[in-house]
Image (cartoon, rainbow, N blue to C red):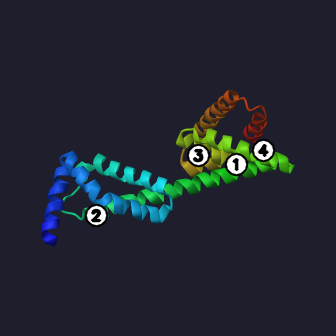
Amino acid sequence: MAALVSLEEKELLTQLKQGDQAAFEIIYDRYSERIFQNTLRLTRSREISEELLQEAFYRIWDKRAQIDPDKPFKAYLFRIAENLAYDHFRKVAKDRRLSEKLLQTAADCYEHIDDLIEAKEYNELLTAAINGLPERRREVFILCKLDGKSYHEVSKMLGISEATINDHIVKATRFLKEYFNRSSQAAFTLLLVYLLGQ
C-alpha cells in the first residue's frame, strides 16, 4: 500500500512538473494543513502562518520545473516552509534592531519624558521612511547615519567605493527630506536634520 501511495505521489509530481493545475490543487489539499500547523507552532500567529503557507506553495508552483518526482516531496516542501519562517524571524529581528537604534538616536536628541513619547512616534515615521529606501541604500544609510561608521569603514565592509556610498547617502537624504516634506511633520524635520547632519 505504501508503494502505491508513493507511485501515486510520483505521478502527481510529474503532472505538477508539467504545469498541471489539478495536480497542484491535490498536493495543496494534501499538505497545506500540516504546513500551516507547523509554521503556526513556530510563529504563533495564524495570520503570519497563512502568509507563509501561501508563499511556500507559490514557490512550489513557480519552481515546479525543478521538482524531482523521485525525491521525497514532503521533506522538500516542509524545508521550504521552515526556511520561510526563519527568513521572517530574521526580517523581524532586523526591523527591531533598526527600530531600537532609531529610538536611541531620537532619545539622545530629547531631554524630557514628554518629548520621548513624541520621539517614539517620530521613530515609527522614520523607520517607515527608511524602509522605503532600496535595500543597499538603506543598508548604507543605517551604517553611516545611525551606526556612525565612516564612509571608509562602510566601503571596506560592503566592498563598494566611497563615491558610491556618498551617492547613496545623497539620494537617501533627498528621499527622506521629500518624504517628510510631504508628511508636513515640522517637528520631525528638526530631528531629521539632526540625523542627516551627523
Mark 1 vs 2, N-terminal side = 2
> Which label is found at residue 118?
4
Residue 196 pos. (x, y %)? 72, 38
Q: Secondary structure at mark 3?
A: helix
Marked residue nearer the N-terminal end (4 or 2): 2
Q: Quadrant of the N terminus?
A: bottom left
Instruction: Out of 48 and 198, give the one closest to the viewer.
Output: 48
Q: Amino acid at mark 3?
A: Glu
Mark 3 lies on residue? 139
Q: Is residue 83 depicted above or below 188 in this figure?
A: below
Name the side, left or right, on which 131 lies relative to 58. Answer: right
- The amino acid type found where label 4 is placed reads Glu
Give the structural element (helix, strand or loop) at label 1.
helix
Q: Which residue is mark 1?
A: 102
Disc 1 from disc 2: Cα separation = 42 Å
Numbered disc 4: secondary structure: helix
Density class for disc 2 (Cα within 10 Å; few <14, some 14-19, many ≥20) is: few
Label 2 belongs to which residue? 74
Who comes first in sequence, dot 1 or dot 3? 1
What is the x, y in percent for residue 37?
Answer: 40, 63
Mark pair 1, 4: CA separation: 13 Å
Q: Residues within 10 Å of mark 3 (few under 14, many from 20)?
A: some
Residue 84, picture quadrant:
bottom left
Q: Are the residues tagged 1 and 4 within 8 Å (C-beta)?
A: no
Residue 148 seen in render: no
Label 2 with label 3: CB-CB less than 8 Å: no
Q: Residues within 10 Å of mark 4 (few under 14, many from 20)?
A: some
| Percent coordinates x, y for residue 134 in the rendering | 54, 39
Query: Above or below — where is 41 with respect to 59?
Result: below
Quadrant including the C terminus = top right
